[in-house]
Image (tube, rainbow, N blue to C red):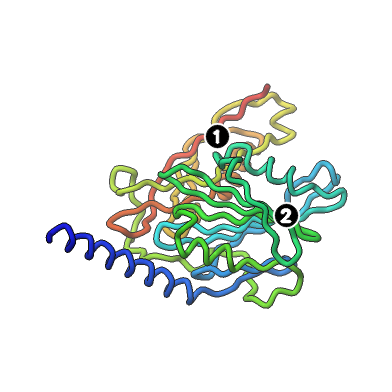
């Protein structure tokens, strides 16, 4: 009798969780950005960063954009890259983006949205489940990512099922900025590692480039920065603990600002925490 009662309670809790997730997903809003060829539903206004990156095959710099937000320990991201002539193939883009991702090649599934072909991959890492979809439109290459929940989670399906591709999307246009933080922020100050229940989880840590002046003068060294991984998903309060001349410290700071992460957790809430970053500049 006790076993049956326990089973009934578990089933009831599971159903309640699914209903809560589906209810929350139904309140999501579709977002896009100026010049983009996609829209997607997200639980809140996402943070967005637009930069320029060099594309050797095209001999010029192109627009690269990231849009991300998180809720209940799940990170939702969209990465966009302008694809100039000669265009990069979807297959080459996927190979470039997943070289160190840990995604399972055997999980590949072909997709099509709005007449544009794509592919889906998942990671079977139970500590950090990841699902990604890649698409190539007329002028863009896209990577849609969810980290922190499995493919059977209704929020994950809501995110991927909401993707629309093509020009002139009817959605709320986002501008560069921190977005609207999700999850209560009860911390007045940043914590240190031993004071949090789970440290900030790195998603992407771009490496800085050498400056021409530093390379010319054969400069090597380590830049050490003390920064705050904020509860809003931004790198703030950057302090220089050790610098390297000829613009390398500035390059390290630029790279630090582009770090992508899931904020630290304390008592079930996202909080800010101090971390030390080291950028090793070596000539090879």
Q: Say which of 100 and 237 sits in front.
A: 100
The structure residue drawn at horizontal position 65% and vertical position 44%, both measured from the top left corner, is: 97
Quarter of the rendering containing residue 253: top right
Would you identify the image quadrant in which residue 96 lies? Answer: top right
Q: CA distance from mark 1 to mark 2?
A: 29 Å
Position of residue 65 relative to residue 174, above or below, is: above
Evaluate whether residue 84 shows in this view: yes
Can you identify the residue that label 2 sits on?
141
Image location (x, y in percent) of residue 181: 45, 65
* Farthest top residue in view: 284
Q: Which type of secondary structure does the marked residue at label 1 adopt?
A: strand
The residue lying at 83 percent from left, 53 percent from top is 84
Q: Position of residue 88 (x, y in %)?
A: 80, 47
Closer-to-camera residue (190/61)? 61
The N terminus: image quadrant: bottom left
Q: Choose the circle earlier in sequence order: 1 or 2.
A: 2
Contact flag, marks 1 and 2 (Cβ < 8 Å): no
Q: Residue furthest left?
A: 1
The quadrant of the image that shows the C terminus is top right
Identify the residue under disc 1. 279
Residue visible at 62% across and 64% down?
176
How many numbered marks, from 0 up?
2
Which residue is nearer to you in this view: 181 or 148? Answer: 148
Tell me residue 255's x, y (percent).
59, 44
> Within 10 angstroms of label 1, few (less than 14), some, or many (20 or more) residues?
many
Q: Is residue 238 left or right of residue 56?
A: left
């Amino acid at each position: 009798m006790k076993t049956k009662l326990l089973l009934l309670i578990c089933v009831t809790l599971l159903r309640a969780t699914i209903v809560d997730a589906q209810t929350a997903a139904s309140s999501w809003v579709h977002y896009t950005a100026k010049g983009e060829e996609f829209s997607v539903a997200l639980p809140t206004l996402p943070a967005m960063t637009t930069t320029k990156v060099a594309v050797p095959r095209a001999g010029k710099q192109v627009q690269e954009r990231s849009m991300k937000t998180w809720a209940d320990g799940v990170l939702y991201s969209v990465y966009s890259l302008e694809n100039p002539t000669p265009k990069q193939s979807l297959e080459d883009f996927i190979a470039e983006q997943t070289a160190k991702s840990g995604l399972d090649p055997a999980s590949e599934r072909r997709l099509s949205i709005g007449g544009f072909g794509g592919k889906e991959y998942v990671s079977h890492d139970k500590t950090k489940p990841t699902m990604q979809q890649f698409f190539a439109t007329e002028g863009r290459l896209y990577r849609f990512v969810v980290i922190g929940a499995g493919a059977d989670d209704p929020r994950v399906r809501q995110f991927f099922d909401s993707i629309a591709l093509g020009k002139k999307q009817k959605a709320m246009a986002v501008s560069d900025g921190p977005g609207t933080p999700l999850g209560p922020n009860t911390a007045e100050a940043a914590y240190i590692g031993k004071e949090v229940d789970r440290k900030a989880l790195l998603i992407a840590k771009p490496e800085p480039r050498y400056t021409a002046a530093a390379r010319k003068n054969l400069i090597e060294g380590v830049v050490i920065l003390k920064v705050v991984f904020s509860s809003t998903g931004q790198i703030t309060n950057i302090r220089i603990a050790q610098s390297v001349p000829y613009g390398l410290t500035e390059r390290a700071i630029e790279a630090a600002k582009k770090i992508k992460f899931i904020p630290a957790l304390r008592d079930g809430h996202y909080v800010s925490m101090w971390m030390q970053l080291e950028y090793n500049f070596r000539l090879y």
